[in-house]
Amino acid sequence: MNNTISLTLLHLAFCFTLVSFTPISALELHGTGANMVETTCQKTPFYNLCVSALKSDPRSSGADVAGLAQIGADKLKAKATATLRQITALLKVAKDPKLKMALRDCADYYNAIVKYDIPVAVEAVTKGDPKFGVEGATDAANEADACARGFKNQPKFPIYASNKVVHDLSAVVASIVQLLL
């Protein structure tokens, strides 16, 4: 589990490095439509997740990069909120004290994602300060990683799939916002 997390963090850092040095033309930044989704998602670490998340929202057909970042943040907030509800439900039925502690920690991390990290990212993009948007989305990914680390000594990680989507979608949003710098 530690190796997986370490590799994920290394991969994420590598992807952010690539994204930050990948040039984007003015035309790409100011275009709209389906091609805009593909062009933008090619600059993220999770292309398929990015395309499916953005194209599932009708706003994406006319969105620029800032609009796509907003859509991604909306999808991230919805998934993080659903994961927080899942954690809360599991806490009500968990018997093992170690599992309960890991779930409580995850609830704290997910409260931070929903109440602070995502709103900071959205506000930063809205106000034209993408640097703080990247930081907010990256913090959300880090919170998801911290949640996963809490289960390293547990026989199972009951929210693995949801947590991974939140982590990966956070990385996608951070990459999209990075394009606005």
Image (tube, helix red, strand yellow):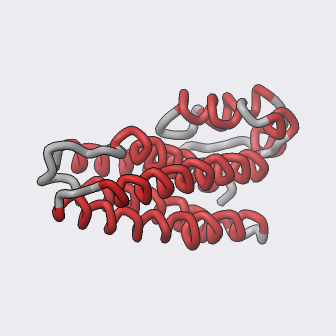
The residue at the point 55 percent across, 68 percent down is: 117
The residue at the point 81 percent across, 44 percent down is: 64
The location of residue 115, given as percent across then percent down, is 58, 71
The location of residue 81, given as percent across then percent down, is 56, 56
In front of the other: 124 or 180: 124
Answer left or right for 156 relative to 47: left
Residue found at the very far right of the displayed protein: 62
In front of the other: 81 or 174: 81
Q: Is residue 14 visible?
A: yes
Q: Quadrant of the N terminus?
A: top left
The residue at the point 41 percent across, 55 percent down is: 87
The location of residue 132, given as percent across then percent down, is 60, 71
The residue at the point 64 percent across, 46 percent down is: 75
Q: Is residue 103 above or below residue 42?
A: below
Picture quadrant of residue 121:
bottom right
Answer left or right for 171 relative to 31: left
The location of residue 181, given as percent across then percent down, is 65, 60
Q: Is residue 22 above or below residue 181?
A: above
In front of the other: 21 or 73: 73
Image mark count: 0
Q: Is residue 31 visible?
A: no
In front of the other: 169 or 147: 147
Q: Is residue 155 above or below residue 139?
A: above
Answer left or right for 109 relative to 76: left
